[in-house]
Structure formats: structure tokens, C-alpha cells
């Protein structure tokens, strides 16, 4: 674990990581600003506004969307540049490679949550909401749900990178993300067809949804994460790294 | 052992997911778990009010959550007045609950066409938050959309028997039908 952390902290110190992080912070700041603005229009003030903004951020899949993009390009870069191969050459086992991937996902989840919180803090200052109000008014169950959601889709990103280590793999993913959202909303709104809610990305999105998850939904999410992790382990063991 | 690692992670993920869900559900119930009845906070506020203290034991309470900035709430006032006329003599207590200060509401009321003929509780943000959170929808996570106004609730014999947000003809008809059914009992 200490070894993983040392390698990753070396990556994070490089401008190749922190410059995109700053850009991401700026990108996430604008939705936060809109959330505070809409909350303020809904007549929320101080603690109520902080709770509203924090809940909206925790229930939004936008952070997840950027997280998938980030993780895919990160994993693809590490595969294509021969970094994973070099770890194997220097004696790391394939299992530790899998665990290292999980560690990277966990570390970047923390970074994303922190950046998203900072976006809220800066946006909140424009509406008279102090950082401690945001901290005290947050729903920590929603935060935990957001972390679980990011973990699930982070693993999908890792699997895609192992299956097709090229940056273009993002395009079908983005297409599928939009298509699935559209199909689910069409089926539910027009035909009241709930079965489509069990599609993979939608199942993961229900983790951060407005409703409590029912048992079939929990089961579907559990099956999907098991399949994703199983396949990721299989690809880590079998892939001929560059 | 190594090949079981992803499955161990998956089990840990599912366990955390289920625990989080159970915790949210538990927190939702915990709002009124320690109370004698679900309407106890309302009756406590009534007991502290000089004019309404005698009404705190009313069997049926109809509560309208509203705000001056909510246009549909203003349109609902004459409709609720009609229901007050219809059910007042049957011991039904109608209450408007507002989170704003009394002076501000009075100032607003002076500019309105219709005045309410039911009792009002002002500056009751805490009570409003509580009432939003007793939403009986089993899938509704606690305290998510308090901006849904107007919301009408009926407490009958210490139980929540009606909860609906929004101002529509159907909502008011449903409120009337529910009161009719309760009076019939």
C-alpha cells in the first residue's frame, strides 16, 4: 500500500495531473454556482441553502461523468506508456497490478470529492454560505453513496481501458451513456416500462438517486459490480501489456 | 486466494451499499420514532400558542404548508376557506404553517384578494422541515425537496392519513374526499 501511495504521489506532483485538476475544479465550479443560484431562487438561505447545494452535488452524476473520462485516459496512458509493463518487469505480480488499479480509483475518488467540495465552497461564498455550513449541513449518507457510485463507474473505466487501451474508447462510452439515459427516460415516461431501469449505468446511477434503492435494484447493482470486477481481474491477468 | 480478491471487493461494495441504504431508511424513521404520535410536534406548538392551546387535542388536523412567495399557495387560500366552512363544525382544525415572520406575512396579506379564515402558525421553519420529512412515500429520501409548496397533510387520531404536494383540482378533491371519509367514520 505504501508503495502504491509513493508511486501515485509522484504522479500527482507532476503538472500533467494537477493542471487538469485545476481545469476540472473550474469546470465543476460553474454547476455549483448554478446550484446555489437555483437554491437561492427557491428561497433557501444560510444552512438550508448549504444543505440544498450539498445534496444537489451529491445527487448529480456530472462528477461521475468527468470521473469516467479521467480514469479512462489515466489507465489508457499507464497501459500505453508501458508503465504497468515496467511494474511487472520489476517484479510486481498481476494481482498487485489489479490492487494498484483499485487503489488508484480510490485515491482519485477522494481527489474528485475534494475538488467538487472546493467548487461548492467557492460558489457558496458568493451566496453568503460559509465552508463550515457546507460541512455541517451535508448529508453524509449521500456523500457515501456518491463515493460508491464513483467506485463502480471507476471500475467500468478501468475495464474499458484494459479491453481497448486507446483514448477513442471514450466515444462509444459517451454515446452509450447518453443513449441509455434517453432509452430509460423514454421507456419510463411513455410506456411506464420499469424493466429498463435495470440497465447497467442506470443501475449505478440509482445509488445516488432521489429514491431509496429497492431489493431488485440492489441485486442488479451487485451483479453488475461483481461482473465488472471479475472481468477486470481476468483482463489484468491475461492482457499482454505493451 | 488471489482470484477471489475481486469477489471479496464486490461483496464489500454490496455490503456497504446495503448498509448505506438501510441507514438512510433508519434515519428516515428515526425522525418520529421516539415521539408518542407522529403529530406530537404540531400539538406541542399548539400548546404554546395563546389562542390555540385549547385546540391541541383536536382529533383531526388539516395542515397547509405554504409561503408568501408561492403563487399556487395564494390561489389555494379560497379553496381551503371553503373546506373550513364545510368541516369546521365537525371538529376539524385547519392550520396554515408558514416559515416567515408574522409582520411580513401580514403585510403580504393586506395586498391579497382573499384572506384565510383558518388559523396560522408563523415563523415555524423547524416544524415545516419536520412535516416535509414525514412524507409517507417509502422511496422518498429524507428532506430532499422542501421547496414543494403548497403541501397539505391530515393527521387523524395521531396518524398521518393524507400527504400531498402541489396545487391542483385533483389534490383539493382528494383532500375533500379524505375529510369526508374521516368525518363519516
Image (cartoon, rainbow, N blue to C red):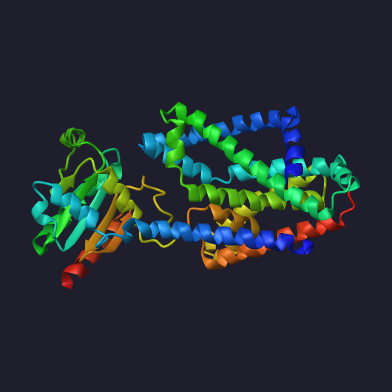
Q: In this view of the protein, can residue A189 be seen by the observer?
A: no
Q: In this view of the protein, can residue B5 be seen by the observer?
A: yes
Residue closer to the observer: B96 or A234: A234
Report the residue at 37% width, 37% height from top: A44
Residue B71: image quadrant is top left
Q: Name the outermost residue toward the bottom.
A: B185
> Left or right of B101: which side holds B11?
right
Residue closer to the observer: A57 or A11: A11
> Left or right of B136: which side holds A239?
right
Report the residue at 28% width, 43% height from top: B125
Residue closer to the observer: B11 or B60: B11
User: Vertically, is B51 above or below A43?
Assistant: below
Residue A95 x/y as whole percent? 80, 55
Report the residue at 66% width, 60% height from top: B10
Residue A121 x/y as whole percent? 50, 31
Residue A227 x/y as whole percent? 71, 62
> Left or right of A149: which side holds B25?
left
Residue A84 x/y as whole percent? 84, 45
User: Vertically, is A190 above or below B147?
Assistant: below
> Left or right of B88: which side holds A5?
right
User: Vertically, is A29 above or below A159?
Assistant: above
Numbered label tally: 0
Amino acid at each position: 500500500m505504501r508503495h502504491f501511495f509513493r508511486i501515485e504521489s509522484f504522479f500527482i506532483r507532476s503538472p500533467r495531473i494537477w493542471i487538469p485538476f485545476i481545469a476540472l475544479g473550474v469546470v465543476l465550479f460553474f454547476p455549483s454556482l448554478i446550484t446555489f443560484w437555483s437554491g437561492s431562487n427557491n428561497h433557501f438561505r444560510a444552512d438550508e441553502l448549504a444543505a440544498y447545494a450539498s445534496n444537489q452535488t451529491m445527487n448529480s452524476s456530472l462528477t461521475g461523468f468527468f470521473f469516467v473520462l479521467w480514469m479512462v485516459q489515466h489507465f489508457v496512458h499507464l497501459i500505453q506508456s508501458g508503465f504497468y509493463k515496467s511494474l511487472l518487469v520489476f517484479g510486481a505480480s498481476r494481482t498487485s497490478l489489479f490492487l494498484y488499479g483499485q487503489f488508484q480509483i480510490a485515491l482519485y475518488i477522494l481527489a474528485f470529492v475534494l475538488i467538487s467540495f472546493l467548487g461548492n465552497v467557492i460558489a457558496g461564498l458568493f451566496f453568503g454560505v460559509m465552508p463550515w455550513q457546507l460541512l455541517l449541513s451535508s448529508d453524509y449518507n449521500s456523500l457515501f453513496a456518491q463515493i460508491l457510485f464513483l467506485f463502480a463507474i471507476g471500475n467500468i473505466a478501468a475495464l474499458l481501458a484494459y479491453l481497448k487501451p486507446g483514448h477513442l474508447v471514450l466515444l462509444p462510452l459517451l454515446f452509450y451513456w447518453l443513449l441509455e439515459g434517453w432509452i430509460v427516460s423514454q421507456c419510463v415516461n411513455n410506456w411506464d416500462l420499469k424493466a429498463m431501469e435495470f440497465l447497467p449505468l442506470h443501475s449505478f446511477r440509482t445509488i445516488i438517486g432521489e429514491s431509496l434503492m429497492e431489493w431488485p435494484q440492489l441485486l442488479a447493482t451487485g451483479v453488475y459490480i461483481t461482473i465488472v470486477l471479475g472481468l477486470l481481474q481476468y483482463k489484468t491477468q491475461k492482457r499482454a501489456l505493451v | 486466494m488471489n482470484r477471489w480478491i475481486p469477489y471479496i471487493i464486490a461483496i464489500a461494495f454490496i455490503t456497504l451499499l446495503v448498509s448505506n441504504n438501510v441507514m438512510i431508511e433508519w434515519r428516515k424513521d428515526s425522525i418520529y420514532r421516539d415521539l408518542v404520535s407522529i403529530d406530537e410536534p404540531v400539538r406541542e406548538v399548539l400548546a404554546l400558542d395563546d389562542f390555540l392551546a385549547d385546540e391541541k387535542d383536536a382529533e383531526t388536523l388539516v395542515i397547509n404548508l405554504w409561503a408568501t412567495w408561492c403563487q399556487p399557495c395564494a390561489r389555494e387560500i379560497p379553496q381551503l376557506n371553503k373546506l373550513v366552512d364545510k368541516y369546521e363544525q365537525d371538529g376539524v382544525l385547519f392550520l396554515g404553517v408558514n416559515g416567515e415572520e408574522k409582520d411580513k406575512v401580514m403585510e403580504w396579506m393586506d395586498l391579497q384578494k382573499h384572506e384565510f379564515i383558518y388559523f396560522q402558525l408563523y415563523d415555524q421553519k423547524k416544524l415545516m422541515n419536520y412535516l416535509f420529512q414525514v412524507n409517507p412515500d417509502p422511496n422518498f429520501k429524507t428532506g430532499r425537496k422542501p421547496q414543494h409548496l403548497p403541501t397539505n397533510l391530515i393527521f387523524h387520531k395521531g396518524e398521518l392519513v393524507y400527504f400531498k404536494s402541489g396545487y391542483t383540482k385533483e389534490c383539493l378533491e382528494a383532500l375533500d374526499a379524505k375529510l369526508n371519509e374521516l368525518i363519516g367514520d
